[in-house]
Amino acid sequence: MNHQTRAALVAMGQDMARAREVLAATERRSILEMYRHEFMQVGGASKSPKADTSKTTKKPEDAISHDNRVAEIADVLLADFDGCRKSKAR
């Protein structure tokens, strides 16, 4: 998974209700394309302000925890996506 897809999943994971809405309605297969063309349009998503990282560094434990959370969000979103696709096929 590239950094752009990862960022899209994290952003979508911060608003699971809206993510489910987009996943239920989309015909797209790419998470990144769903995020760019549909998720960003629903509810007017905006970027959060950039944190000042010049004085702080991530500890390895924090990075691992973040990676685990991204993986959890990806699993939930992909499971919802698969469920929506199966229900549309019926």
Image (cartoon, rainbow, N blue to C red):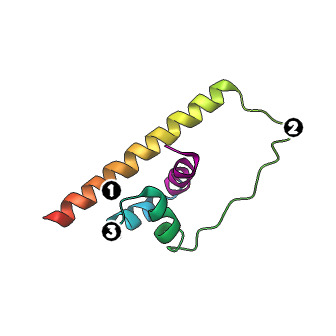
Instruction: Report the Cα–Cα distance between label 3 and label 2.
Output: 43 Å
Residue 34 is one of the magenta-drawn residues: no
Q: Would residue 85 appear left or right of 20 to someone viewing this image?
A: left
Residue named by callout 2: 55
Residue ID at (54%, 69%): 40
Q: Which of marks 3 and 1 is nearer the N terminus?
A: 3
Numbered tag placed on residue 27 in the rendering: 3
How crowded is the residue under tag 2: few (<14 C-alpha within 10 Å), some, or many (20+)?
few
Q: Which amino acid does label 2 sit on?
A: Lys
Q: Is mark 2 on a helix, strand or loop?
A: loop
Residue named by callout 1: 81
Disc nearest the viewer among 3 and 1? 3
Instruction: Report the Cα–Cα distance between label 3 and label 1.
Output: 10 Å
Residue ID at (67%, 62%): 47
The C terminus appears in which quarter of the rendering? bottom left
Among the 4 quarters of the image, the one containing residue 89: bottom left
Tell me the magenta residue range. Answer: 1-13
Q: Is mark 1 on a helix, strand or loop?
A: helix
Q: Would residue 77 appear left or right of 12 to someone viewing this image?
A: left
